[in-house]
Image (cartoon, rainbow, N blue to C red):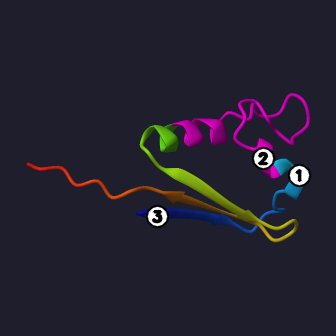
Amino acid sequence: MEISVEDSGVGIEEDKKNQIFEPFFTTKESGNETGLGLSIVFGIVTQLGGMIDVESEKGKGTLFKLLFSRIIHDV
């Protein structure tokens, strides 16, 4: 299963992509936002056995793909 979220914002610089899931990482000015959102999402997705793929180009927005294995339970 895949859930995709895309925006048309400013994008993520290539050298910052490896930091975006770190707690408290932000590119915003001091005093604005804490930078916890993506680290929380990353924790939940990985605890469920999934993974996140990020595609972004500076000036062209970002696409997050949350990928999950299909799990079948016997009832």
Q: Is residue 16 above or below residue 33?
A: below
Mark 2 surroundings within 10 Å by alpha-carbon count, few (fewer than 14), some (14 through 19), many (20 or more): few
Would you identify the image quadrant in which residue 48 lies?
Answer: top left
Mark in front: 3 vs 2: 2
Q: Is residue 37 above or below residue 6?
A: above
Q: Position of residue 23 (x, y in %)?
A: 71, 30
Q: For mark 1, what is the residue?
A: 15
Is residue 62 visible in this depiction of the protein? yes
Which label's residue is closer to the chain start, 1 or 3? 3
Would you identify the image quadrant in which residue 64 lies?
Answer: bottom right
* 59 on left or right of 70: right
Instruction: Specify start and end residues of the magenta stretch as a single range.
Output: 17-43
Q: For mark 3, what is the residue?
A: 2
The amino acid pointed to by label 3 is Glu
Mark 3 surroundings within 10 Å by alpha-carbon count, few (fewer than 14), some (14 through 19), many (20 or more): few
Q: For mark 2, what is the residue?
A: 18
Whether 22 is among the magenta residues is yes
Residues tagged 1 and 2 counted as in contact (Cβ below 8 A) = yes
* 3 on left or right of 6: left
The amino acid pointed to by label 2 is Asn
Mark 3, secondary structure of its residue? strand
Is residue 13 visible in this depiction of the protein? no
Identified at 87% across, 68% down, the residue is 59
Which label's residue is closer to the chain start, 3 or 2? 3
Total numbered labels: 3
